[in-house]
Structure formats: C-alpha cells, structure tokens
Amino acid sequence: MKSEQIEGVAEKVAGKAQGAVGKLFGDSKLEAEGAGHEVAGQLTKTYGDALNNVSVFVKEKPIAALAIGAAVGVLISRFLRR
C-alpha cells in the first residue's frame, strides 16, 4: 500500500469527522471545510491507487511498460518539435 493511499484515507476520515462536528454545532464553515478535506482525501487516495496500479503493472509486465514508455516519449518529442 502506498503512503498516498494511507494519507488519503486518513484525510478523508478526518474531513468526515470535521463535517459531522460542523453539522452538530450548526457551523456551516466547519462543515464546508470538512467536506473539502474529505474530497481532498479521496483525490489523494485515488492518486495513490493509480501509483500502485502502475507499479504492479511495471512489475508484472516490464517489457510492455518499456514499450508504452517509449511510445509516450516519441509522442512527446513530436509535440515538442512543433
């Protein structure tokens, strides 16, 4: 498990708690901040999931990963020539 996944889950849980406290006390600002933290946590977790998936793919299929990397390199060089 990547550290980004753990950080994302932790921030999401903290945001959910912050939002609940804001709702409990009728503090809309605190509730909105909690929702923001919850969304940020989900984005961080999704980023960690993507990193993990790429890492697993590269370990399982290194030749395919090299071919994809080379193709991306060629495309980038063509775009930069213009």
Image (cartoon, rainbow, N blue to C red):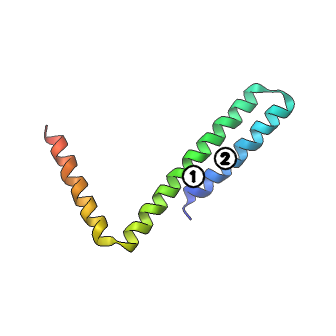
Q: Residues within 10 Å of mark 2 (few under 14, many from 20)?
A: many
Q: Earlier in the sequence, mark 2 or mark 1?
A: 2
Q: Is residue 3 above or below residue 15?
A: below
x and y percentages locating residue 41 in the rendered image: 61, 46
Residue 34 at x, y percent in the picture: 71, 37
Query: In the image as oriented, which residue stretches furthest toward the bottom?
Result: 60
**Furthest residue in direction left, as rendered:** 81
Q: Secondary structure at mark 1?
A: helix
Residue 73 position in % (x across, y down)? 22, 54
Name the residue at 61% across, 53% down.
Answer: 7
Q: Quadrant of the N terminus?
A: bottom right
Amino acid type assigned to the residue bearing label 2 in the image: Lys
In the image, is residue 48 above or below residue 60? above
| Residue 79 figure quarter | top left
> Image quadrant for the C terminus?
top left
Whole-Å distance between the Cαs marked 2 and 1? 9 Å
- Marks 2 and 1 in Cβ contact (< 8 Å): yes
Q: In this image, 71 relative to 1: left or right?
A: left
Q: Is residue 60 above or below residue 2?
A: below
> Which residue is disc 1 drawn over?
45
Q: What amino acid is at disc 1?
A: Lys
Q: Which disc, if any, is residue 12? A: 2
Identify the residue at image location x=50%, y=51%. Answer: 47
Residue drawn at (28%, 71%), measured in percent from left and top?
Answer: 63
| Horizontal relation, residue 53 to residue 40: left or right | left
Position of 70 relative to 14 (above/below) = below
Q: Residue at x 46, y 62 (%)?
A: 53
Q: Is residue 60 left or right of residue 14?
A: left
